Image (cartoon, grey):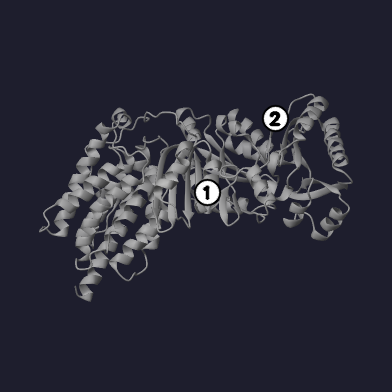
Amino acid sequence: MTELMLEQEYYRFKQAIQGGARLVIAHQQELNKINVFPVSDGDTGSNLASLMETILNETSEQLSSSLALFERVADASLIGARGNSGIIMAQYFNGLYENLGEEEGNSFTSQFVKSAKLAVNHAYQAIERPLEGTMVTVIRSWGEALHEQNQHESIEKRLDHALEVAKSALEKTTEQLEVLRKNQVVDSGAKGFYLFVEGFTRSFNHPDLQLVEEEATPLTVQIHQQELVSEKPVHRYCTEVLLTGVVATKDELQAEISHLGNSLVVALNRGKARIHLHTNQPAKVLSQLRAFGQPVQQKADDMLLQYEIRQQQKAKIALVTDSIADIPADYLLTQQIHVLPMTILLGGANYLDRLTIENQEFFEQQKSGGERGTTSQPALSQIDNLFAYLATHYESIIVVTVSEKMSGTYQSVKRIAQKGLLSAPIEVIDSQQNSAAQALLVMRINQWIQAGEHFETIIEKAYLWRQNIQIFVSVDDLEPMIQSGRVPQSVGRIAQKLNLKPLVGVADGAGVLSGFSLSLAANESKMLKKIMKYHQKRRLLRYGIVYAGHGERVAKWQKLLSDKLGMVPAFVMPVSTVVALSAGAGSIAVAFEIDEGVKSR
């Protein structure tokens, strides 16, 4: 082929890939609405759109050849894949690339046609238990039809024929799975792939055509507007991990974690692996996968919370906080509170606070000489995705973040909220607290929401209620506080030499030293006196106890405060790993609300 012909071929394939990606993105809400398998979590469209956005971004620049183009798609798909369907499609794209370029005498177009069929096995192998009536059925139908059509036909006619076969296969999915038949919808992942090949075909055959949403070919199976029938998920978290530096096989990865959940999908190519699993133990999944590669991306979406909201939404106002707020998992679920997990960077790997790493594992890594971890606020894309979901389910949104003086989370969330792209009004509140104190503010706001108070009234009261919350932290080991800058290094080193134990509080949103003691017992005695002084002067409404490490002292504190205050704590739980980074093992904290009522601003 001449250089001009190769350039034209490259341009057509690039237009086709981008046309397919844009058509999927245009239909993401439709795909979300019909998403009932493997769980009815309503995010297949969003997940596939995320994959397509990555592909569009990574193929925007000029590449050297059609083969380089498909290599870029393969790499981008492993990075951008989300959800069961996204990872299956990513594995298919990687199989497509792997089988290209093997027969140098053939044109690239003929290699593509052959590879489209060979890559089908890659898609099936990504799934632990493939089921017909899903995306893989349409992938197989399209790939085989494209390859087996009369080889003397033009590529344009072969693509048109394969698209018709894929359409027929998609429509039949409604009768192949019981949950699809019950809801009278096609499989959402299968339709996502069909939309991609429809956009691919039309853009390849008509390079100058600009596809828009309305131009999609209608299917005979229509979306029903009534609430889709769904089943309660067996496992709580839809967990995904991207590993780099992987030398293991797909079978080895599947064997390692298959017992931890279901809906296992593994896409693997050239040292990168994207893993999807529904599980109740995301931290254990990460712990075991770490032996096979470096975790660089991960997510753990709460499918059970999403299910509960679909079945019986408790309020019209969404309440969101970050993972630094120490709130029991059961309370978050029953009260339908959404959490943005902070990111922990440890040993070159990324973890999601409270989800994919636990305090005990963190402290064990520190004891074994591991490097000190660092933290970062939730990614902007993570915040964006959550807000997009909430805006479709709620009339308004309230976000309560850790103190702005302690983290950049408040500014990150505020930046997304100020875009003005959401249909629901949103208020981002700086709690001026952290840990258990932040949790108490969130719980108080939740009470107002559940009582049916208006959005504006709740916001007004929340800003004032911050002053009614206090926290004290008894610290055993000063080193983490010195390393994190919470205690000035010069003061901290002197205190260490004298074996002094600090008592830490929060004032105006910043951590402050409330004094030092010569022993842990004296430090705890000082903390108890401060708490009782508040109680005697103003009366405590509610309190919580949190701890870092094994928490041997927790039982003593729980009994002591229950006896002294005449009420049990609202919660007793391990502190966020993010806070544990600076508080250190052995720390214990008590947060409480003071009965001062609410005054006008």
Q: Nearer the viewer, residue 209 or 172?
A: 172
Q: Is residue 533 left or right of residue 255?
A: right
Q: Position of residue 585 (x, y in %)?
A: 73, 45
Say which quarter of the image contains residue 376.
bottom right
Residue occupying the point 86% across, 57% down: 494
Q: Which mark is residue 383?
A: 1
Whether residue 328 is visible, yes or no, is: yes
Amino acid type, callout 1: Ile
Q: Position of residue 553 (x, y in %)?
A: 77, 35
10 Å neighbourhood of mark 2: few (<14), some, or many (≥20)?
A: some
Q: Nearer the viewer, residue 551 or 442?
A: 551
Q: Nearer the viewer, residue 408 or 467?
A: 408
Residue found at the far bottom of this picture: 3
Dot in front, 1 or 2: 2
Whether residue 452 is visible, yes or no, is: no
Q: Is residue 353 left or right of residue 469?
A: left
Element class at badge 1: helix
Residue that numbered label 2 is attached to: 570
Q: Position of residue 331 (x, y in %)?
A: 60, 31
Up/down of 526 relative to 343, above or below: above
Element class at badge 2: loop
- Looking at the rendered image, the quarter that the N terminus falls into is bottom left
Residue occupying the point 67% across, 51% down: 368
Amino acid type, callout 2: Ala
